[in-house]
Amino acid sequence: MAGCELCRPARTTCWYAEFTEPFPFVIIECDSCDVPMAVLGAHRRAPTEEEHAILRRELGRIADAKYPDGWFFDDHMRQIPDHYHAHARPIPAWARPYR
Ligand SMILES: [Zn+2]
Ligand SMILES: [Zn+2]
């Protein structure tokens, strides 16, 4: 898809992981948010249920290591609504439960 920045993510940002099996997707640092983001390898609005589960699991691995105090899965697509991607955003300190 021409002009879609998620179809050709910039190699200049941090790439956490790149997958080709069982389907292509990458986990990279989001340029605008500075958080890990999983991006489907095909220009589609939504992943299948199975793809979603795998993508979420792999993003979770990276997010757990990066944000031990907590993070949340955010796949509301505001800027690029027709190419599936999901952010792992840290839970802000004020929203964390006491422990
Ligand atoms: Zn795209
Ligand atoms: Zn972002």
Image: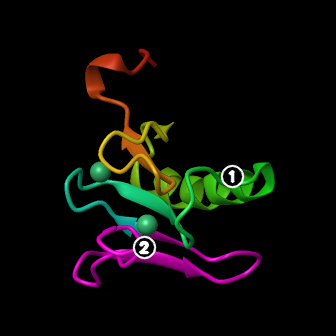
Q: Residues within 10 Å of mark 1 (few under 14, many from 20)?
A: some
Numbered badge on residue 75: none
Q: Is residue 29 magenta?
A: no
Q: Is residue 44 left or right of residue 85?
A: right
- Asked if the residue at label 2 sits under 8 Å from ligand 1, the reply is yes
Residue extending furthest toward the top: 98
The magenta segment is: 1-27
- Relative to 83, is 3 above or below? below
Does the stretch in magenta take in 24?
yes
Horizontally, residue 79 falls left or right of residue 32, namely right
Q: Which residue position holds label 1?
A: 52
Is 83 left or right of 4, judged from the image as shown?
right
Q: Residues within 10 Å of mark 2 (few under 14, many from 20)?
A: few
- Give the residue drawn at x 50%, y 77%: 17
Disc 1 secondary structure class: helix
* Comes first in the chain, label 2 or label 1: 2
The residues bearing labels 2 and 1 have C-alpha atoms spaced at a distance of: 21 Å
Q: Which residue is mark 2?
A: 1
Q: Nearer the viewer, residue 6 or 29?
A: 6
Ligand 1, by image quadrant, is: bottom left
Amino acid carrying mark 1 in the image: His
Tell me what residue is drawn at x 45 percent, y 45 percent.
68
Residue 63 on image: x %, y %: 47, 53
29 in relation to 94, above or below: below
